[in-house]
Image (spheres, rainbow, N blue to C red):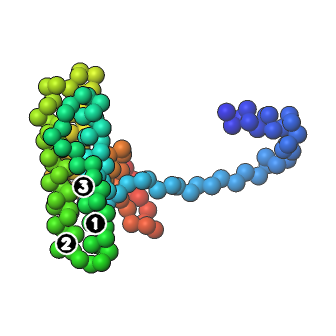
Amino acid sequence: MLTQTIKAAESARVVKPQSFHKVIVDSTVQEKAIAHSTDSKLLERARQHLVKLAAEAGLVLRQNYNREVPRLAVQVGRYAHAKQYKLMRASLKKLKTVVGRVWRDVERQLDKIPDALRDKTSELLAKAKHLLAQKQRDKNKLYSLHAPRGRVHRKGQDAPAL
């Protein structure tokens, strides 16, 4: 595709052939959109995915917490910013409890899920379970639902070879 673009530019005389003698390559790597493992936003995303999957599968949840969880997720960030860590931990605990309730509700109704969604459901339930069970100092933490192999590195540090 790049070759065709270059040929089209040359034939239209937009670019001179001598412009291709020196090529500058930008090797900047864009950071992945991954959050910290204890981040309230990640728990909120897990709940959103579970609720969306339940609706797709035709499951009736006892409660989906669409109003409560976003408010709790914001509160966690505000309490952390204000260095009110007791309140932050209480909100985070409540958030984990709510996500766990939705997770258990979907897990209870696994037999009602159509076969077409079984793999997707089991994968999402496994990720949510891993997310709820992980602790701050655990290894192999889940940092993102869409890129489960993603890792968090300090800025300015070279990424280790995988």
Circle 3 crowding by C-alpha within 10 Å: few under 14, some 14–19, many from 20: few
Q: Position of residue 42 (x, y in %)?
A: 30, 53
Q: Of the numbered discs in the image, which one, if any, rests on residue 87?
A: 2
Is the residue under label 1 in contact with that under label 2 (CB below 8 Å)?
Answer: yes
Q: Of the numbered discs in the image, which one, if any, rests on residue 91?
A: none
Which residue does the image show at 18% across and 68% down from the upper left?
89
Location of residue 59 with respect to 149 vertically, above or below: above
Mark found first going from the N terminus, 1 or 3: 3
According to the image, label 3 marks what residue? 68
Q: Of the numbered discs in the image, which one, if any, rests on residue 75?
A: 1
Most distant residue in the bottom direction? 83
Tell me which corner region of the image, top left, top right, bottom left or bottom right, holds residue 126.
top left
Which residue does the image show at 58% across and 55% down from the upper left?
27
Judged by depth in the image, the label closer to the viewer, 1 or 3, is 3
The number of callouts visible is 3
Q: CA distance from mark 3 to mark 2?
A: 16 Å
Mark found first going from the N terminus, 2 or 1: 1
Task: Choose between 135 and 97: the one closer to the eye.
Answer: 97
Q: Position of residue 91 (x, y in %)?
A: 20, 64
Tell me which corner region of the image, top left, top right, bottom left or bottom right, holds residue 125.
top left
Amino acid of disc 3: Glu
For numbered disc 3, what is the local secondary structure?
helix
Task: Choose between 143 and 53: the one closer to the eye.
Answer: 53
Amino acid of disc 1: Gln
Q: Position of residue 103 (x, y in %)?
A: 17, 43
